[in-house]
Image: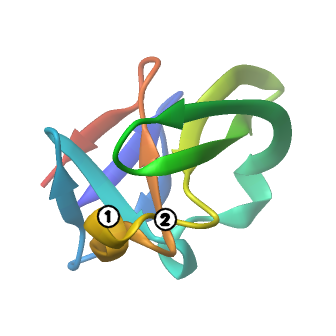
Amino acid sequence: MKAIWNNTVIAESDHTVVVENNHYFPADSIKKQYFKPSSTHTTCAWKGKASYYSLEVDGEENKDAAWYYPEVSELAKTIKGHVAFWKGVTIEN
């Protein structure tokens, strides 16, 4: 699977985990040069507290377009150490 934004592959893995129709990519499969930490946090009732990354590709920013759970609940342990995407990031096989 590939995560693509602004015509650039920002993550690629053969081992994503699908939860709620989102592909979660292993953290070591993201191309870190495109990711910037964000101060945004949200809370999911069953997964825990999410942290975000903003993407920057070719001088364009996509704020808070990737999220992950630094600490996950027992119910969400399959996505620990994984990153998911939204806000125009496409996922292709």
Q: Is residue 18 left or right of residue 82?
A: left
Q: State the CA–CA distance, disc 1 to disc 2.
A: 6 Å
Which quadrant, please, contains the C terminus? bottom left
Q: Is residue 38 above or below residue 92?
A: above
User: Are the residues flagged by discs 1 and 2 in contact, CB closer than 8 Å?
Assistant: yes
Quarter of the image containing the N terminus? bottom left
Q: Estimate the x, y position of residue 10 in percent, counting from the top left.
A: 53, 52
Name which residue type carries label 2: Val
Q: Amino acid at mark 1?
A: Ala
Mark 1: give few (<14), some (14-19) or many (20+) Cα within 10 Å. Answer: some
| Residue assigned mark 2 | 72
Q: Is residue 76 left or right of residue 32?
A: left
Residue nearest the observer in this picture, 90 or 76: 76
Residue at horizontal 34 percent and vertical 46 percent from the top:
46
Q: Residue 79, how many percent across, how many down?
A: 36, 68
In the visual, does 59 lie left or right of 49? Answer: right
Give the total number of marks visible in the rendering.
2
Image coordinates of residue 60 in percent, x first then y, are: 76, 21
| Residue 10, placed above or below residue 50 | below
Front position in the image: 11 or 37: 37
Q: Residue at x 42, y 27 (%)?
A: 86
- Residue ID for mark 1: 76
